[in-house]
Image (cartoon, coloured by chain):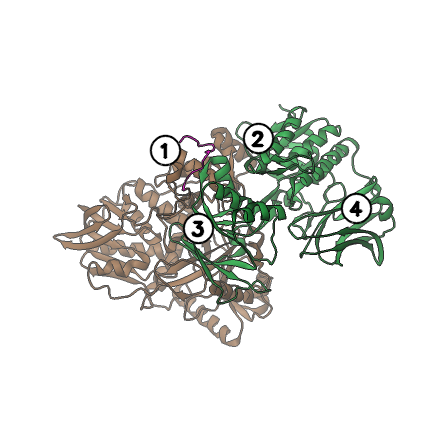
Amino acid sequence: MENNRYDVIVIGAGPAGLAAAEAAHKGGAGRILLLERDNTLGGILNQCIHNGFGLHYFKEELTGPEYAGRFIELVRKTNVEVKTDTMVLAVTPEKRVHAVNEKDGYIVLEAASIVLCMGCRERTRGAISIPGARPAGVFTAGAAQRYLNIEGYMVGHRVVILGSGDIGLIMARRMTLEGAKVLACVEVMPYSGGLTRNIVQCLHDYNIPLYLSHTVTKIEGEGRLTGVTVQQVDENRAPVPGTEMHFDCDTLLLSVGLIPENELSGGAGVEMDRRHNGPMVYENMETSVPGIFAAGNVVHVHDLVDFVTGESQRAGAAAARFARQGPAPEGRVLEVENGASVTYTVPGKIRLANVDKAVEIFFRVNRVCGNSVIRVMAGSEQLAAYKREHLAPGEMERISVPRVLLEKADGCITVSVEEA
Amino acid sequence: MLDVAVIGCGIVGANVAYLLSQHKLRAAVFEKENDVSMGTTRANSAIVHAGYDPEPGTAMARLNVRGSALTKEQCAAFDVKYRQIGSLVLAFSDEEMATVRRLYENGVANGVPGVRVLTREETLAMEPNLSDAVCGALYAPSAAIVEPWDLALALAEAAVENGVELHLETAVTGAEKISGGWRLHTAKGDFEARAVVNAAGVEADLVAAMAGEPGFTTIPSRGEYYLLDKSQGYVVNHVVFQCPNRDGKGVLVSPTVHYNLIVGPNAEPSGREDVSTQADALAFVREKAVKSVPGVNFRENIRNFAGVRANTDQSDFIIGETAPGFITLGGIKSPGLSSAPAIAEDALALVAGAGVALEKKESFVHTRTKKRFNEMTPQQKAEAIRENPLYGRVICRCETVTEGEIVDALHRPIPPRTIDGVKRRCTAGMGRCQGGFCGPRVHEIIARELGISQQDVLKDRAGSYIITGTTKEGGLHHGE
């Protein structure tokens, strides 16, 4: 009988899971298991063959597969056990993991601590209710990316992209390089949802027009897509009559947002934070269930993989510590709340006794801000302030708040952005 | 010469084919699409109506009540998803309470079991998430929800296993009276049959006109829907209707057999095959739905779709001979799904009347079982994987559908050849990511199992190709 008891089980072997497993090993956890539903490690990075990964973490520019490869190498050098082609069906609050694969069949594993690293999925046409026909040729950008970069298939010749999220922008360039004509990138918001560098390198460099405050209002085609109607929207995102533009195209790629994949988290009894649609996490990425941690896009959607890595290393190290020493010290808990212009914060709560020197707080803004001050307040008292020249919803922000300053707060702190 | 030719393989054609297959005769079904259940059968409210709507004395009233009882038996025999959850028709005014009482009277006259009128308090106790404005409701415990496309498929498969020929992608383009029967012109040549059953749905009038004077005209009426994530599947526990109006049964809110929430439909004149959705129609559906259930969270929408009702210039179903031996089942609008098995019984009587001898076979396929991994206990899952390791490979993450189920579906008597065909058979791609993850993998499995190129696998109907070529470098499939 195989021993099904582990110190740490990591669910998902994308960038978050790889970093968490490696950090759990470094942190002294004995028996570690990494579970992956796909047949290879690396997650979505495997289909991200463009460069731009690793500038912060490795200080060099890598492709997605290269970035994943570095961590796969690190994990291979440890005694972390890996099961690929293995689907986790349930995680229980008692920290049992139910999973299936071809070889082991139905298995129930136990862990002292668990790290949830399931990543996210793409929002679909249904999520935004685009009217019209339902032909082939409407893809989420990530699904199209898989066809091109993993399978080697082209998915169309004349392309419109809805949404200026990073995957959509990357696919605009990729489809162009493969000989397709990308007619337009259409964004419903008055600003882009992706990184500035991707707007420049993927649209401007190829003369692909970006229509801000526009959306697709009709999809046409019986078998395959034959065209879309694009319309300007008003400040309430309602289409403006008379602004219709028609594009003859056979492909519509959707890059309209990502949703953390938390079906397993719900079953584990983990409390969710509705601000970012992921688990509420403490300073060390522990969820509301002691010994269950979460990191990466399953918690909140990141802009750069480098930050996923950092966050997941913290989660992995904390999971190892939990397995060795049990629960983190209790004591004073601070809630971290949204102030002006802020849509969410991670962490959602801070246990002061568990903070070493400082806490990193990640957040996003809900509008484009020029010269601004980020303020961390405890009631009417300002604990810290940080200057930024530019903040945008498409880019995640990060501040580090020293523990000595947090000591001054009681109950809750707020993070807000004030434009100069 | 065929004994019977059936035109159309939706829920009505499939029921007729299944009944025919129980008899010692030669029958064939002609379907213009590349799969069964491709018309109204795959895009409707998926309700087995109790039978209080039709006016007493109509064919509709008789066939609805009998049909819904038969549907329940069929779903049990063929392992088709079916849940008898009961329905409520809500009233929001004294006038609507009068309608509710009239429907109650209809129900009693039509022999609908267990119908009763509920007070406001009783209604809200049954469905706490309903609007406070509700005044009362009609409760019909025998109403049920079903997976219509799978029921038609199961019946068509049984018919095929029992010897009925199924010709897909075979549109019937003309009919000619010949001695002792009919000659049908089709996309695959001529076929002769002693009797013809026209089950062509929204095109039944056009098909009837090939043989004679149809006596009715289809007035297609499109209905549009929202399908919401399972997170919303528990907002209501019954099929929640509003009072019917001139255009139909109004906007309903109901759980589906897969524990999603379905909301719709509106009713708008449309083309016979125009199943596109419109922004204003969807807005209308939302607005009506929240009148019944204010808390429906439309942000959890995963798909919009539309279907076309085969409304006609007549209020009742149209069942009879267009010409001698040419039987038309026309105007099969709601409650057509609920009535279909009973309509097929009428059709068979007409076939017999046309001189085709109906001698029952001693034995025939009358059951089906389906393995659904996500409904198994852990022990059953372990056993399924031991028997076939492909059951240990989860392909569709949202609905937990395994490769084993997909491969099983691809080797059934009517194998799917499209991504949506697989979806209808085993729910892969039906969940919240809408095939974003599993679509490409289902695509590969179809090509592998059917021995065809991935480039020849369609998403859905003819022309719905997915791949336009290979990339410059190629990928996994470089050199194909």
Q: Identify the mark nearer the N-term, 1 or 3.
A: 3
Which is nearer the eye, A178 or A21? A178
Q: Is residue A295 above or below residue B215?
A: above
Which is nearer the eye, B66 or A48? A48
Residue type at tag 4 = Ile
Q: Are marks 2 and 3 in contact (CB under 8 Å)?
A: no
Image mark for residue B147? 3
Q: Is residue A385 above or below residue A358?
A: below
Which residues make up the magenta segment? B468-480
The residue shown at (59%, 35%) is A63
Residue type at tag 2 = Thr
Is residue A98 inside the magenta stretch? Answer: no
Q: How many marks?
A: 4
Q: Residues within 10 Å of mark 1 (few under 14, many from 20)?
A: few
Q: Are marks 4 and 1 in contact (CB under 8 Å)?
A: no
Is residue B470 inside the magenta stretch? Answer: yes
Which is nearer the eye, A9 or B235? A9
In the rendered structure, the residue with mark 1 lies on which chain? B
- Whether callout 2 and callout 3 share a subunit is answered no
Q: Is residue B216 above or below residue A197?
A: below
* Residue A261 as seen in the image, left or right of residue B478: right
Query: At which x and y percent is residue A163?
Result: 55, 52
Q: Identify the mark nearer the N-term, 2 or 4.
A: 2
Foreground mark, 4 or 3, reads 4
Q: Is residue B360 visible?
A: yes
How far apart are labels 1 and 2 at the CA level?
A: 27 Å
Image mark for residue B451? 1
Chain ID, green in image: A
In the rendered structure, the residue with mark 2 lies on which chain? A
- Mark 2 secondary-structure assignment: loop
